[in-house]
Amino acid sequence: MDRIEYIVARIDGDYAYLRKIDSSDAEDKCVARAFLPDEIMEGSRVVYEMMSYDMA
């Protein structure tokens, strides 16, 4: 499976909007915060790998 790196662009309530680090033209991905590590905040780097999100 692929490893995709994101930066948390913004947090809006129970959702976070993730921006791919290697692609500036892609739309932000909306992800429920329940799937993300508790310690995320705007500007955090997260990695999606093996169907889960972890801090980078």
Image: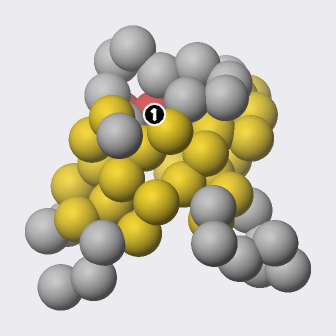
Q: Quadrant of residue 1?
A: bottom left
Work out whether 22 lies above or below 56.
below
Q: Which residue is mark 1?
A: 33
54 vs 15, nearest the viewer: 54
Residue 23: x and y, percent?
71, 76
Q: How is the image coloured?
A: secondary structure
Work out whether 40 lies above or below 15.
above
Residue 34: x and y, percent?
35, 33
Residue 29: x and y, percent?
64, 63
Q: Is residue 27 left or right of residue 52?
A: right
Work out whether 46 lies above or below 49.
above
For this orientation, the residue located farthest to the right is 25
> In this view of the protein, can residue 29 be seen by the observer?
no
For this orientation, the residue located farthest to the bottom is 1
> In this view of the protein, can residue 28 be seen by the observer?
yes
Q: Quadrant of residue 19?
A: bottom right
Residue at 22%, 55% (x, y): give it. 52
Residue at 23%, 65% (x, y): give it. 49
Q: Is residue 54 left or right of residue 32?
A: left
* Quarter of the figure with the C terminus: top left
Work out whether 14 lies above or below 48.
above
Crowd around label 1: few <14 · some 14–19 · many ≥20 (10 Å): some
